[in-house]
Amino acid sequence: MKMKYSLSLGRIAGIQVFVHWTFLILIGYIVYANLKQGMDTIDILWSIFFILTLFACVTLHELGHALAARRYHIKTANITLLPIGGVAQLESMPEKPKEELVVALAGPLVNVVIAGLLFPVLSLSGGLDDLDVTRFSHHNFLPSLMVVNIWLAVFNMIPAFPMDGGRVLRALLSFKFERHVATRIAASIGQLLAIGFVFIGFFSNPFLIFIGVFIFLGAQGEAQYAQARSLLSGYTVANAVMKQIPALKTTDTVDSASDQLLASQNKNFLVVDHDNVLGTLSRDEIIRALREGKGAESIEGFMDRDFLSLQLNQPLEEAWTTMRTKQKSAAPVFSGSTLVGMLDTENVAEFLMISEATKKD
Ligand SMILES: [Zn+2]
């Protein structure tokens, strides 16, 4: 699923590349900052060209992850460029330590290779003699590009989630510990580093505070995700399934669906015709339809027909991760071809709370 308000730049190696609209803010900011410094038009165009080249390197970095993941049969939904960097949306992360290590290292390695290719060219042409990258101009375009690629490799190797270095650290720890334990240790190290960044940031560069907060939240998210997965492992969908199916018919209107939303605890519904599931309808979809003033219309036009079907004996961990990656808040559960219930994310969250509370650890 692509991020909202992103523009497609086309496909590379079969992977769709998007650029997020906030990227325009970055370009605007650069023009503004350059004008304030009194740069002329030519130099401003050069600095924009430099940023675009830099983001081409970022795209190659993400492509490095994506192609390494492809070796392990993991698909990449898309690559999105944000002003702070790129994100390759891998459909899953490899679980084997060696594979995770390779996928995580592949990105920074691309930047090392780019810098490595520029270095001999520059040292032969004397481009490194008076290297001053603090003041960018078209005279030091390639040296700046080399320095920035080295910086990208180093920055991404900070051993903290969500940086590549965090994954490298987890993969290395996974050779010795169980995955969720390795994640917990890696996340703690990352958060400690993040606090360090914030602390140093107060006395020097405020940008470090921003990086620190970003890393702290990333580490927290990754630790929670790993914790959830380890709590779910060993269970099947049958352990968490809702047997009372909140069902709607295609003849129901959005208004009647919203009445049911208010009258019950359900946030997701199955749209059924006899025992046939035709789609799912979530609270968000109901609210969206109401906002468009279509309360009197049939729910048929608003339900999600591309729903996910789960099996009762499927591992719960697998069902939950698939729901997350496909961004489905609910899914019908079948035993063979018979509809037996529904699983939604609220359900799984409750299941997690219960197993957390009763865990003997
Ligand atoms: Zn990376």
Image: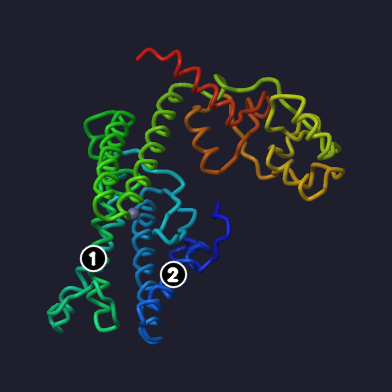
Location of residue 154 in the rendering, given as x and y in whole percent from the top left corner: 23, 56
SS class, disc 2 = helix
Q: In the picture shown, does residue 23 fall above or below 306? A: below
Q: Which colour scheme is used?
A: rainbow
Q: Mark 1 points at which residue?
A: 113
Left or right for 25, reference 68: right
Location of residue 6 in the rendering, given as x and y in whole percent from the top left corner: 55, 61
Residue at 17%, 73% in the rendered image: 119
Left or right for 242, reference 256: left
Location of residue 300 in the rendering, given as x and y in whole percent from the top left corner: 79, 43
Disc 2 beta carbon < 8 A from ligand 1?
Answer: no
Could you classify mark 1 by the number of other residues whose Cα lies within 10 Å: few (under 14), some (14-19), or many (20 or more)?
some
Rendering quadrant holding ligand 1 = bottom left
Q: In the picture shown, does residue 111 fall above or below 309? A: below
Q: Which amino acid does label 2 sit on?
A: Tyr
Q: Mark 2 points at which residue?
A: 29
